Structures are given as C-alpha cells and as structure tokens.
Amino acid sequence: MREKTIRFAALSLLAAVAVWLDQWTKELAVAHLMGKGAFPIWEHVFELLYVENRGAAFGMMQGKQMVFFAIAVVVIVGVVYVLWKMPMSRRYVPLELCLSFLCAGAVGNVIDRVTRGYVVDFFYFSLIDFPVFNVADIYVVVSALLLAVLVMFYYKEEEFSFLQRK
C-alpha cells in the first residue's frame, strides 16, 4: 500500500507540474498577447494569437460552463479511481502517464473556467486555419490519442480486470 501511495503521489506531482506549466503559459499569453494582433512564429504557418474561449474544444458549445465543469469533474474522479485501482506494475506506466496528463489538461481548463469564466487559448496554425488551442488542450488530445492506441494495440482486455467489481 505504501508503494501505491508513493506512486500515486508522484503521478499527482507530475499532473500538478503540468497544470502549473499550462497556467504559466496562459498567464504569459494574457500578459503579452491580450489586446494585440497575432504574433507570427512562422509566417503564414504558426502564430500566437490571444483568444478567450467560452466553449468546449475548438470553441464548440459556447457558454455551457457548467456542462464543461461537470464533465471535467467526472473525468478527474474517473482518472483518480482508475489510477488508484491500477496494479503496481511497470506494464501500466504508459497508461498512468496518459491518465495523469489527461487529468492535468482537464484541471488546467477548469481553473480557467472557474477563475476567468473562459479558457485562454493562444496557439494558432494559420496555414490550415486550425482552431486556437492551449497547453491543456495538447495534454488532453495527445493523451486521449495515446490512450486509444494503448487500449487498442498494447493492452489486452484481461489487463483491465482490475476495474471489475469483486
């Protein structure tokens, strides 16, 4: 039990550092980009552009803050439950890391919704007119994609038996 507590604490610390990085980059965006035009990093390809997102991913469902908050709480509780139930094995480290970053992304955007009433976005791929996003969004998207790959190709169904009620 002590090992599991230490591992859980380490994953929580990783998530906390990831949330800090997300919040720090958003503060930089507010301080240096708010009220200004786009700041090109690579002309006509990638730029920093301050956007206040009151919706979900990529600006969908504008103004539904309580829905996003509820979804984030469910995700966070689910991740904590799965991480706590997960067996102590090196085999599960990729899954633990993905879940930690997924949780960090959810927490990072919830902090914005609670403190600001919107999420600060600032990365913009102008070449393809991709929706503006932030570090927390990167955590969520990358970890969700990796989770899908891990579940489909790396883990076997029986390796998730720890989630079944006994």
Image (tube, grey):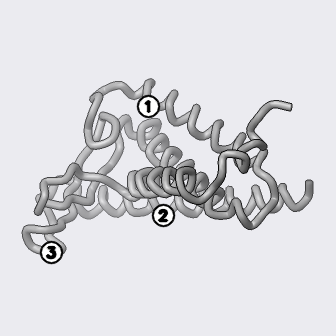
- Is residue 19 visible in the rendered image? The answer is no
Q: Residues within 10 Å of mark 1 (few under 14, many from 20)?
A: some
Disc 3 from disc 1: Cα separation: 33 Å
Label disc, if present, on residue 103 of the rendered structure? none
C-beta proximity under 8 Å, tags 3 and 2: no
Q: Residues within 10 Å of mark 3 (few under 14, many from 20)?
A: few
Q: Residues within 10 Å of mark 2 (few under 14, many from 20)?
A: some
Residue identified by numbered label 3: 42
Residue 11, given in percent of the width and then of the height, sits at: 68, 59
Q: Amino acid at mark 2?
A: Leu
Give the residue at x 18% y 61%.
125
Label disc, if present, on residue 68 of the rendered structure? 1
For marks 3 and 1 on the same chain, the one whose residue lies earlier in the sequence: 3
- Is residue 83 visible in the rendered image? The answer is yes
Quadrant location of the N terminus? bottom right
Give the residue at x 48% y 43%.
111
155 relative to 50 in the view: left or right: right
Quarter of image, res 58: top left
Q: Nearer the viewer, residue 51 or 163?
A: 163
75 relative to 117 in the view: left or right: right
Residue identified by numbered label 2: 21
Work out whether 78 lies above or below 132: above
Work out whether 102 lies above or below 47: above
Q: Residue furthest bottom?
A: 42
Q: Nearer the viewer, residue 29 or 15?
A: 15
